[in-house]
Amino acid sequence: MGGAADTQAFARLIVLPGVAHRGGGDGPDSFNGLGAPLSWVEQGQAPSSLLTSKVVNGTVTATRPVYQYLLIAVDTTGGPVTEAASYTARLPPVRFDANVRWAASFSPGYEQVCG
């Protein structure tokens, strides 16, 4: 799609660590999923992060920023791990390798589906 810079003109990937596919899990899973895209479309402000919260029994127990892929939230202040202000965006210590090395063979043609 023209490389990372061209793709970021219209797309962002923000991953929620510790969150199950339909919400829940150990990570902060509450966030305004409409606000960032709406600001992008209406004001041209592309999101680079979202503020997430963990809510237990109606009470916010933790907040954390999540950043656009490939950045991760790192506690750089030594502050409380439950407060978003303790985190800044950093590159992960080891880059993710998306080249999967299969341990077995598959039906003919399957490898073209999985790439």
Image: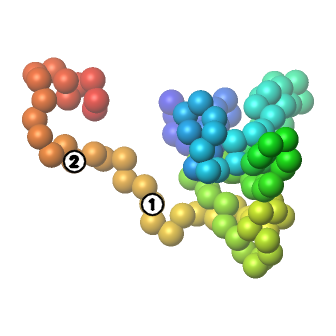
Q: Can you give x and y, in whole percent of width and height, for residue 104 in the image?
A: 11, 40
Query: Looking at numbered disc 2 in the image, what kind of residue is underneath it?
Result: Arg
The structure residue drawn at horizontal position 66% and vertical position 67%, both measured from the top left corner, is: 74
User: Residue farthest to the bottom?
Assistant: 78
Question: Position of 23 compared to 78: left or right?
Answer: left
**Whole-number angstrom distance, CA of label 1 to CA of label 2:** 16 Å
Question: Position of 114 compared to 22: left or right?
Answer: left
Q: Give the crowd class for mark 2: few <14, some 14-19, many >=20 residues within 10 Å.
A: few
The structure residue drawn at horizontal position 88% and vertical position 24%, both measured from the top left corner, is: 42
The reply to whether residue 5 is in sight is no
Q: Regarding mark 1 in the picture, which secondary structure is present there?
A: loop
Q: Which residue is mark 2?
A: 101
Answer with the quarter of the image where residue 85 lies. Answer: bottom right
**Between 36 and 23, the one nearer to me in the picture:** 23
User: Residue farthest to the right?
Assistant: 43
Q: Can you give x and y, in whole percent of width and height, for residue 84 in the image?
A: 80, 60
The reply to whether residue 16 is in sight is yes
The structure residue drawn at horizontal position 56% and vertical position 39%, both measured from the top left corner, is: 20
Query: Looking at numbered disc 1 in the image, what kind of residue is underneath it?
Result: Arg
The structure residue drawn at horizontal position 11% and vertical position 23%, both measured from the top left corner, is: 107
Q: Can you give x and y, in whole percent of width and height, for residue 99 in the image?
A: 30, 47
Q: Regarding mark 2 in the picture, which secondary structure is present there?
A: loop
Q: Which residue is mark 1?
A: 95
Colour setting: rainbow
Q: Relative to residue 101, is residue 31 depicted above or below?
A: above
